[in-house]
Image (cartoon, rainbow, N blue to C red):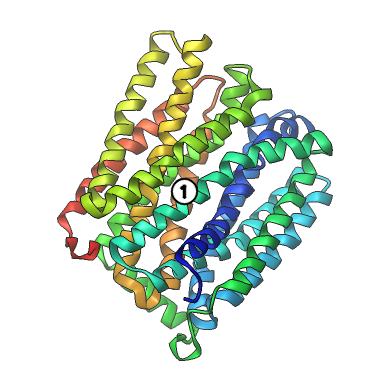
């Protein structure tokens, strides 16, 4: 690697952040999209988010194995091209149905920089050092969701919500060009694995037959599920419960920026405490926070200034928890399979994303203008994540060296 660690972290963060900006940049537009394209069923506007995530999950199954066979950088180029094309279609699309199909394909394109970036980190680092680098990536990564809703709202004020997709095009073009000029290809010709279904099947079998990897993936499903519930429902709660839709982007930016400190905390502590312990602490803390918020709601105090700031703190805890869990769990899942890093990154990301988005989408459809479904969903997933992360302690800690 011919560039500094700091620049490598910045580039990887930008690639991974393609997903964040594609989701969070749309949040300010959800109510307008609902009024314009699906006024009879406003909850359907959430599909703008879930279809993208579903496409991203589908894409992760193939981009990793392809990057093991053809190199990391070419796969990012193809993914970025598909992303840019489908974003342009979204600008011109006349109906929700066309936008949803385009968003699905946009998610497929976004899966390339997201998954291949994870493989690149594994190509150059391992063990707790990999987790530390992943934490630093998350610090920069967190800045994108912090400003994405603000940028989206500014674009809407200047033009209209469809022009948000032009912002996406500019972001992906910039990050891809930066990567192209500054990152060396890590999978040289002699390291490439022939692409065929048998080889992919054997690699998948190797990943799924490892109990530590499988447990890490299951735990990652719950971690992502909690985050997606927060992302999918934070804007409706702001608008329908607290009547603060106009200030939502500013509060969201504040939450995301403050929560980005979790990645710094994780980077400082992971070498001392280990990935398993930090993950378990984060899940157990979320169980406690969700229980407190439910008590506030059940006793009738989830309203006014007190209820609003209680909700803000709870959202902060969800995003903070993400910084203590997702990077560590991904590192645990990837550590034993460095020789097939691209394929492993695909399978880990695909299962975690598909499982979590299905769970979060189900919870989202139960939203009825109260926070009950959101609180219940997060509390349930945090409890299951706590149980699952506890099981990780039984596996060999030598993988954390």
Residue for badge 1: 139
**Image quarter of residue 43:** top right
The residue sitting at 29% across, 60% down in the picture is 128
**Taking 66 as reference, is 102 above or below it?**
above
Please state the total of marks drawn on the protein image.
Answer: 1
171 sits left or right of 70 in the view: right
359 sits left or right of 395 in the view: right
**Taking 123 as reference, is 161 above or below it?**
above
Q: Which quadrant is the C terminus positioned in? A: bottom left
204 sits left or right of 158 in the view: left
**Taking 36 as reference, is 310 above or below it?**
above
The residue sitting at 47% across, 12% down in the picture is 306
**Image quarter of residue 384:** top left
Residue 362 visible? The answer is no
The residue sitting at 17% across, 62% down in the picture is 396
Q: Position of residue 49 (x, y in %)?
A: 61, 44
Residue 270 visible? The answer is yes
- The residue lying toward the viewer, choosing from 101 and 70, is 70
Q: Position of residue 383 (x, y in %)?
A: 29, 36
**Taking 61 as reference, is 247 above or below it?**
above
Determine whether the residue tagged by mark 1 lies in a helix, strand or loop: helix
90 sits left or right of 343 in the view: right
Q: Position of residue 164 (x, y in %)?
A: 74, 45
- The residue lying toward the viewer, choosing from 208 and 258, is 258
The residue sitting at 75% across, 29% down in the picture is 39
- The residue lying toward the viewer, choosing from 182 and 235, is 182
**Image quarter of residue 79:** bottom right
CA neighbours of label 1 inside 10 A, class few (<14), some (14 to 19), many (20+): many
Q: Position of residue 185 (x, y in %)?
A: 53, 79
């Amino acid at each position: 690697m011919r560039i500094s660690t700091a620049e490598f972290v910045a580039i990887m963060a930008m690639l991974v952040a393609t997903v964040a900006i594609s989701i969070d940049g749309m949040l300010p537009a959800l109510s307008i999209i609902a009024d314009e394209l699906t006024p009879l069923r406003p909850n359907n506007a959430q599909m703008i988010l879930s279809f993208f995530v579903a496409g991203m999950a589908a894409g992760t199954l193939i981009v990793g194995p392809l990057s093991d066979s053809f190199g990391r950088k070419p796969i990012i180029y193809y993914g970025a091209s598909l992303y840019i094309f489908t974003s342009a279609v979204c600008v011109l699309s006349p109906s929700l149905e066309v936008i949803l199909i385009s968003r699905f394909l946009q998610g497929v394109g976004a899966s390339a920089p997201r998954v291949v970036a994870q493989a690149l980190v594994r190509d150059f680092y391992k063990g707790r050092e990999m987790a530390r680098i992943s934490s630093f990536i998350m610090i920069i990564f967190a800045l994108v969701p912090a400003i994405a809703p603000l940028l989206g709202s500014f674009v809407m004020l200047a033009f209209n919500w469809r022009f948000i997709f032009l912002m996406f095009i500019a972001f992906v073009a910039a990050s891809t060009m930066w990567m192209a000029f500054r990152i060396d290809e890590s999978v040289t010709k002699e390291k490439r694995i022939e692409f065929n279904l048998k080889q992919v099947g054997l690699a998948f079998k190797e990943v799924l037959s490892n109990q530590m990897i499988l447990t890490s993936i299951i735990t990652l499903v719950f971690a992502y599920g909690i985050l997606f519930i927060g992302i999918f429902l934070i804007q409706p709660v702001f608008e329908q419960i607290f009547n603060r839709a106009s200030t939502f982007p500013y509060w969201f930016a504040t939450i995301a920026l403050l929560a980005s400190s979790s990645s710094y905390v994780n980077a400082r502590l992971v070498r001392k405490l280990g990935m398993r312990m930090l993950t378990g602490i984060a899940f157990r803390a979320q169980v406690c926070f969700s229980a407190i918020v439910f008590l506030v709601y059940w006793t009738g105090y989830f309203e006014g200034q007190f209820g609003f700031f209680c909700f803000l703190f709870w959202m902060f805890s969800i995003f903070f928890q993400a910084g203590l869990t997702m990077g560590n769990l991904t590192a645990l899942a990837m550590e034993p399979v460095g020789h097939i890093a691209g394929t492993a990154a695909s399978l880990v990301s695909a299962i975690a994303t598909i499982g979590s988005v299905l769970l979060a989408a189900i919870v989202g459809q139960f939203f009825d203008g109260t926070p009950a479904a959101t609180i219940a969903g997060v509390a349930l997933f945090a409890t299951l994540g706590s149980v699952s992360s506890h099981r990780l302690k039984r596996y060999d800690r030598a993988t954390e060296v």
